[in-house]
Amino acid sequence: MILLQSAKRRLRACAFICSFSSLFSLSPLFAQDFQSEPLPLPLEEVRMFTEALDRIRMAYVEEVDDKTLLENAIRGMLSGLDPHSAYVIENDFDTLQENTTGEFGGLGIEVGRENGYIKVISPIDDTPADKAGIEAGDLIIQIDGRPTRQILPQEAADLMRGEPGSEVTITVAREGQEPFDLTVTREIIAITSVRSRMLEPGYAYLRISQFRVNTSNELEEEIEELYAENDEIKGLVLDLRNNPGGVLQASVGVVDAFIDQGRIVYTEGRIEGNDMEFMATTNTVAADVPLVILINNGSASASEIVAGALQDHARAIVMGTRSFGKGSVQTVMPLGEQRAIKLTTSLYFTPSGRSIQAQGIDPDIVVENAFVTRRSRNVAQVSESNLPGRLDNANSQDKEAGTNDEMANALISAEEVLVTDYPLNEALNVLKGINAFQPQPRTNSSGTFAQRND
């Protein structure tokens, strides 16, 4: 009897090996990626798997068909590798398309996994998640009362998506606070990846919220408009904070807008001949203007490629806090009709050879996110201009106007008291400092150089 059971198990193992191998046969598109002979299967582990499969089929409280069991096995096998490998089926293909080019109903939030929990990589600008106050680093521990422990990031994303106008309640755990609930109304998430504005005369601000297919083109258009509408651009701030990444080619295009030669990024993986390298071209629209890049722990993937490349080329000063550290490449490999695996196949490296994975990009200048209160000037303070019998400034055309304006501005409005974006304010100060080290000749009213006596 024992011998008969053993023989049956061996037959089942052989049958399983055949079906298991066929599940992972790649389409001709990807067959060229694998030049070596197929690796031998570990028979002892395969026997263990088939025995577990057999016991589930016979003893589980409900009957489950073989297709579901095997798909769950593939899904679990991939999810156990890293947070970004996944099994892609049917509607998940639409999700992949939405993530790069399309629109969808949801909250506008990029999530990953950490220690079994769903972690917010970053909320996307001007989306329901951003407006509700969700922050990079938050843990989502429940979605509509369903615990998220051990569920996959894609499952969590699917739970948060839905019809525009419908509501979803998420429970958030944030460091230093008790868990709290947020009820958020879903909206159509249509993302404009690049926007710009002038901070002060001569100093421009560029914000990239996510790297989409056309992001590099949008960036070039925004820069060209800034130059066309302003007499002079003396400095640019490129804001990549809470940017979760996106399309690799878009990040390459953004770097290419600021440099005209050299390596931008390269990848290394196990498959020989499949490593990639991207080089700068002469298609550069802002090669010389001083540049500051803002990053934080919500800056991931493509954002880190941009920050790391421009930092290595000494083309930009990187400010903020260390980035997220997502430096891996995922490749979608079809397994058949409406089935594929999204598999981590290589790692990104900056031009100087730094690996981004689990390390991130360290800023040149660390600037923590903070709210800064500016003190108004005390009206009791006096200066030389306030003293009776003072000598007036020799260059002043209206000697009293300066004093009166100074006293009038001693008390500032409530809106001016709070500097709400401290890192951005510091980035602007750095750009002003760079320009201060390029002094222009000083002349007096007669046009001759003025003598300075300290």
Image (cartoon, grey):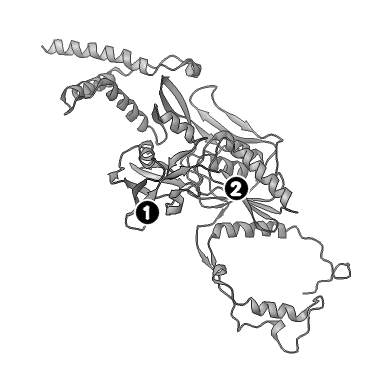
CA gap, disc 1 to disc 2?
30 Å
Callout 2: 10 Å neighbours few (<14), some, many (20+)? some
Image side of residue 116 versus residue 236, left or right: left
What's under tag 2, amino acid-wise?
A: Arg
Q: Residue 229: x, y in percent?
A: 72, 51
> Where, by quadrant of the figure, is residue 436 drawn?
bottom right
Image side of residue 312 versus residue 124, left or right: right
At x 61%, y 45%, the residue is 311
Q: Which mark is residue 195?
A: 2
At x 43%, y 17%, the residue is 26
Q: Of residues 44 and 247, which is closer to you in this image?
A: 247
- Residue 340 in sight from this viewpoint: yes
> Which residue was labeled with disc 1?
174
Q: Residue 171: x, y in percent?
A: 33, 50
> Where, by quadrant of the figure, is residue 21 drawn?
top left
Quadrant (top left, top right, bottom left, bottom right) of the N terminus: top left
Q: Residue 235: x, y in percent?
A: 68, 53
